[in-house]
Amino acid sequence: MKVGYIRCSTEEQNEARQVRMMEEYGTEKNYTDKASGKNTDRPEFHKMMAFVRSGDTVIVESISRIARNTRDLLAIVAELTGKGVEFVSIKESIDTTTPQGRFMLTVFGALAELERENILERQREGIAIAKEQGKYRGRKPQDVDPEKLREVCARWRAGDITATAAMKELGMKPNTFYRRVKATGL
């Protein structure tokens, strides 16, 4: 079976171009994620990996759609190969059934990783310039009632609730929660 994997980085991006490519390549089933490719924490990706069986072929528009770093890409392809599943990337003309295809996969995987690192570097540079110009101040600090923070932390420290439950009750992510706890000495 030909299985297509489609990924857009954000909800706002349109996957129509990738869908058309999958139709042209005759995929029988497609999995679509709207999430960053920086790691493999993508629900449809996991469903696709669980679905494919020996003799199937996973088709992607480009390797950057399935992975953004070489390590993930090679691990994904190794897992597919272990299942007897072929991997095809349309843009780079990579077919992992050949030694040349496996070599090119490694080269293009490194290029995709370099591209991601370049994007992040440009983003950091842009933020630094914006900060210098006073146009960027970062995210507005989250307002939390100090009394509620104190009360929830006391219950957490007493073992009445877990840290996860405390974070949920306060509406905080782990980094913010632990930073606030440390800053307030709770």
Image: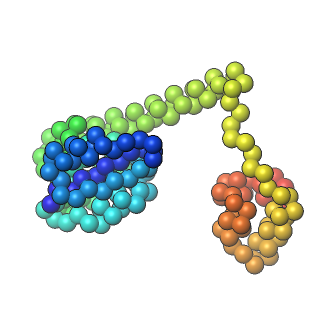
Residue found at x 81% / y 62%: 149
Residue drawn at x 40%, y 33% as measured from the top left: 115
Compared to 150, does 19 lie above or below?
above
Quadrant of the rendering where the N terminus is positioned: bottom left
Describe the colour scheme in one phrase. Answer: rainbow
* Residue projecting furthest to the bottom: 160
Residue 74 spot, x, y in % from top left: 30, 50
Instruction: Tell which residue pokes out farthest to the right in this image.
Output: 147
Q: Is residue 79 left or right of residue 146?
A: left
Residue for point 18% across, 58% down? 28
Vertical position of residue 17 compared to residue 182: above or below: above
Q: Is residue 121 left or right of residue 149?
A: left
The quadrant of the picture occupied by the C terminus is bottom right
Q: Nearer the viewer, residue 50 or 98?
A: 50
Residue 185 seen in the figure:
no
Q: Residue 135: x and y, percent?
A: 69, 26
Location of residue 100 by image quarter: top left
**Left or right of 184: which side holds 103?**
left
